[in-house]
Amino acid sequence: MDRSPSRPKLLLHACCGVCSAYVPEILRDEYDVTIYYDNPNIFPQEEFDRRAEAARVMAEKYGLPFILVPQGTIDWYRAVRGHAKARENGERCRKCITHRLDAAFRYAKTHHFDIVATTVSVSRRKNIEQVHAAGRALASVHGIPFLDRDWRKGGGERESQRRAKEAGIYRQEYCGCVYSLVKMKARVKSRVTS
């Protein structure tokens, strides 16, 4: 796909390949989209690598530039410190999403993007208002607009899952952080022992 100087440059933070299987298609006719994979929350490293590769494959499928930020977990752990026991979509998730989006906004500002969006809000497991509130707050801080569309409308998550399966990319079983991995393993164990 040709890059058009007449369309705004959009930096799309991607959390995984599944979420990147549908959202870029919605955006690419209206924006010059670049996929930005920066997810220091993903644990362990092998999981980070699998998700990054899946997101890269989807970016390639759409003919979009792909930016991979090496995993750097220290700042992320500092950002969520004290919230290890928080519930899913609670304060830890809010801090995590804000931390990752802040990095995207900083990258967008430095590299002259016009707008920022994220694929995180396509997942039914995420609190869409929490994601959008973080994006809008950071837009004010950085002076770059945040595109706060509801990617779930019209079966967006289901379509993302279908396309990811069709593309044969990795589809994860948990949110991504060590805390969600522990909870997922506990759920699996309780099913086995029940």
Image: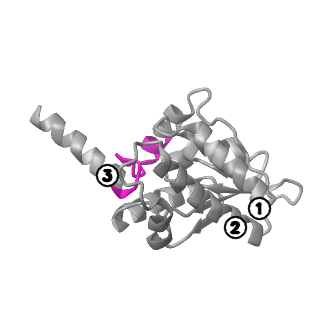
The answer to whether residue 116 is visible is no
Mark identifier at residue 106: 2
The answer to whether residue 153 is visible is yes
Residue contact at pointers 2 and 1, CB within 8 angstroms: yes
* Residue 135 vertical placement versus 126 (above, below): below
Question: Is tag 1's residue or tag 3's residue first in the polypeptide sequence?
Answer: 1
Residue contact at pointers 2 and 3, CB within 8 angstroms: no
Range covered by the magenta-colored residues: 163-178
**Residue carrying label 3:** 181
Q: What's under tag 1, amino acid-wise?
A: His
Q: Considering the image in quadrants, where does the C terminus appear?
A: top left
Secondary structure of the residue carrying numbered label 2: helix
Q: What's under tag 3, amino acid-wise?
A: Leu
Q: Considering the image in quadrants, where does the N terminus appear?
A: bottom right
* Residue 18 vertical placement versus 3 (above, below): above
The quarter of the displayed image where residue 63 is located? bottom right
User: For the point 44% across and 62% down, which residue is it?
Assistant: 81
Q: Position of residue 95 (x, y in %)?
A: 53, 54
Mark identifier at residue 142: 1
Overall secondary structure of the magenta stretch? loop
Q: Which of marks 1 and 3 is in front?
A: 1
Q: Report the front residue among 179 and 21.
A: 179
Measured Cα–Cα span from mark 1 to mark 3: 32 Å
